[in-house]
Every structure is written in structure tokens, then in C-alpha cells.
Amino acid sequence: MKSNFKRNIINSLLLAIGFILHQIAPPIFFGMKPDLSLTMVFIIIILNEDYKTTLMAGIVAGILAALTTSFPGGQPANVIDKLITSNVIYLVLLPFRNKLNNQIKVIIFTSIGTILSGTIFLTSASILVGLPQSFSALFLAVVLPAAVVNTIAAPVLFNAIQLSLKHAKVNL
């Protein structure tokens, strides 16, 4: 019980850090920002091996993104996107849990996950509220650059988190 409580607090702090990083990240195009809170969700999924944590991280990240989105009518799309993306990444990661180094997993699954997340977001937003530009224009101008930024930021954040956990003598 004590370790679950500690794990939940650490995961909450990681989501809060991701939320803050998302707020201070500069916009790429059309006022859209790379979603660094999504990077934290992927790190949480890699650090924790249980499904409940994945599900909760996806829901909380979706709600936080919905509260702060600059996309017109993007609130439901954010929740849908984070929930589906976190579940898919969890399932795709299962066969690789013990086969790949965490650094490699962070890089691969952040890039795949960000592209998947952007695709789900744009698809659900187009169905629910419409898009201000074409799907392909938004994908090329926002999703792909966000994937590059997240893929570069993810190992840096992961190493900082690992170092912090090591110095705090915390095992997840």
C-alpha cells in the first residue's frame, strides 16, 4: 500500500511537471504547442508496468489538456486522444517491456505515440467541431514538428527523472 501511494504521488508530480512544461512551451504553427504533458504520460507508462496507472495518467492528462487547449472546441478531442493513445501505447509496449533499454523505449514510443496522438486528436476534432485548416496541413505543420520536439525532449526528461529518483532512493 505504501509503495502504491508513493508511486501515485510521483506520477501526479510528473503529470504536473508535464502540464507546466506544456504551458511554457512556445507555439509551433497556428498557435498550437507541442504537448510535453504527453511525453510525461509516455514516461509514466514506461516507468510503471500496471494498466491502472496508464489509464489514470491518460485520463488526467486528457482533462488537463482539455482545460488549457488553444484549439477551438478541442476539449473533447483532447480527452479522447489521450485516453486512446495511452491505451494503445501501453498495449504496444507490452511485448517490448523486458526486451529494450528504457532509453530506446522512450525515444521510440514517444515518437510513435505523439504521431498517433496528433492523428487521433485531428480526426476526433474534425468529426466533432471541424478543423481550421486541412488535416494534412495541420499534420505536417503541427503534429510532425511536435513529434520531433517530444522525441528530443523525452530522453532528456526521462534521464532527469531517473536521476532524481535515484538520488531520492525511490524505486518504481
Image (cartoon, rainbow, N blue to C red):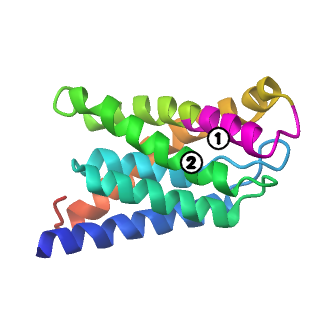
User: In x, y percent, where is residue 131?
Assistant: 83, 39
**Residue 93 among those drawn in magenta:** no
Circle nearer the N terminus (2, 1): 2
Find out whether residue 132 is within the magenta segment: yes
- Above or below for 112 versus 63: above
Residue lying furthest front: 128
Report the residue at 78% width, 23% height from top.
136
Where residue 6 sits, quadrant-wise, is bottom left
Please name the residue that numbered disc 2 is placed on: 80
Question: Is residue 168 at least partly visible in the picture?
Answer: no
Q: Is the magenta stretch mostly helix, strand or loop?
A: helix
Residue 172 appears in the figure: yes
Callout 1: SS = helix
Q: The residue under label 1 is which amino acid type?
A: Phe
**So how many labels did they put on this image?**
2
Q: Which of 65 and 102 is in front in this view?
A: 65
Lateral position of residue 97 relative to residue 117, left or right: left
Which amino acid, mark 2? Ile
Please report the residue visible at 73 percent of the width from the left and 38 percent of the height from the top: 127
Nearer to us in this view, 44 or 90: 90
Tell me residue 110's x, y (percent).
46, 36
Query: SS of the residue at dot 2?
Result: helix
Look at 61% across and 59% down and name the residue there. Answer: 65
Q: What stretch is highlighted in magenta?
A: 117-133
Query: Pointer 1: what residue?
Result: 121
* Label 1 Cα crowd, 10 Å radius (few <14 / some 14-19 / many 20+): many
Labelled pair 2, 1 in contact (Cβ < 8 Å): yes
